[in-house]
Amino acid sequence: MLTVANERDETFSEAHGQNTTLLRPVVSELVKHEPGFYYLLQDAEEHVATGNMFHLRAVAGWRWLSWTHRTVRPDRHPVIGYGTILSDGGYFFVGIDATPLQSLRRDLWLSLAWSSVAFLLIGLGGGFILSRLVLGKIESVSLTAREIMRGDISRRLVLNGTGDEFDHLSGSLNAMLDRNEVLIASVRQVSDDIAHDMRRPLARLGQHLDEATDTPQPDSRNVALERAKDDLHDALEIFSSLLRLAQIEAGDRIPDSQTLPVVELFETINASYLAVAEDHAQTLVVAMPPPDMVIEGSRVLLVQMLSNLIENAINHCSSGTKITLSANQGQGGTVLVVSDTGPGILAADRERVFEKMVRLDASRTVPGTGLGLSMVRAIVRLHGGNIRLGDNNPGLRCDIMIPVPIPYRP
């Protein structure tokens, strides 16, 4: 198109005007010497004055002709050109063969058509494959869910290892299922523990009530009723302890967690158990830590943890025993230490005493439910720490490490 515009401008420049008379000789020469162009010069009555084309309707501007309209060497090639209305009413048209442009346009349309078909096929194929993959993953999740609903709570979703959104979703669902399994196991354990551990006090309660019913003497009846009352108290204490222990073991966050000075915990223990130890002819030594030593956690649970350890030492040690409570700052956190100079625990039994309702032979005659150390370990684990029993030479030493900061366990 630029070539046509340049040829038109050069023709007007060579003719020194834009009328039929001035353009006639110039166009006649161009027809002879420029066979690659199409020229047409018409007068005001639309008669062909000169050129190598037949008559055209005078239309100004760019034109696309489906055939050449040549007067010599006829052909059917398309032509693109520009028509100009002259100053005297004549008409001048100059153009070139538009076959390459037509071929290019046809090729572009063919490319566009084939590209559209290809994109359509790729889109349909890709959509089909993607839908099959997505539906396959969804069906896998559905099958796993049905297996779990049938009772297989240990079933988990399979991770494909690609780290995509489905892997993230599967990981989150697996974490939820792990948590649910822990809660269900905790409920089952509590049910089993209650069914097993309540049997003995309830059986004794029944025996004493039978004695009270069958005994005619008022004094004997009152004694039997008092024993039945004690048995009921023991049963309620076991029930309450098991429920509390289950709540702590099933917890994933520390209730009312705060930063506490360790000295406050020790002052509470000292005020509560100093007189109790003296009543048992024992010595309780609380080594107060510096005021800036802090610990993160629940004040109620931490006090209960230390109380259970001190009570165990008081109840299971003889008179003259020295019980010590101290603390130090370890590399991974705060270490609380409860030690005594009593009989201690054999190395083979130091892990077993943390189990529920376990009572060693030496402590059979000591009142208790056998849940104290189980409660201690549950509280320590809830706080992200660990507990270890060792030899105090003589006696038992209990080291509890509470990390700082408290790690969050999802």
Image (spheres, helix red, strand yellow):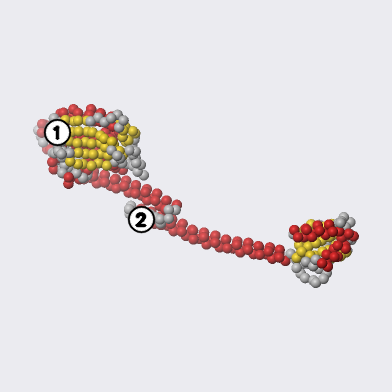
Closest to the observer: 49 or 187? Answer: 49
State how far apart marks 2 and 1 are (Cα): 57 Å
Q: Residue furthest left?
A: 217
The correct choice, above or below, for 75 with respect to 302 in the image is below
- Amino acid identity at mark 2: Glu
Q: Which residue is mark 1?
A: 321
Q: Position of residue 94 (x, y in %)?
A: 80, 62
Q: Position of residue 187 (x, y in %)?
A: 29, 45
**Residue in the picture at 63% in, 61% down:** 112
Instruction: Give the quarter of the figure containing the C terminus.
Output: top left
Query: Quick check: can you spot residue 199?
Result: no
What element does badge 2 sit on?
Answer: helix
> Neighbour class for label 2 at 10 Å: few (<14), some, many (≥20)?
some
Query: Quick check: can you spot residue 95?
Result: yes
Closest to the observer: 230 or 142? Answer: 142
Locate residue 288 relative to residue 41 in the image: left or right. left
Closest to the observer: 80 or 109? Answer: 80
> Neighbour class for label 1 at 10 Å: few (<14), some, many (≥20)?
many
Q: Please tell me in which quadrant of the rendered image residue 152 appears.
A: bottom left
**Residue in the picture at 82% in, 64% down:** 39
The correct choice, above or below, for 60 with respect to 295 in the image is below
Q: Which residue is mark 2?
A: 147
Locate residue 112 relative to residue 341 in the image: left or right. right
Closest to the observer: 6 or 194? Answer: 6
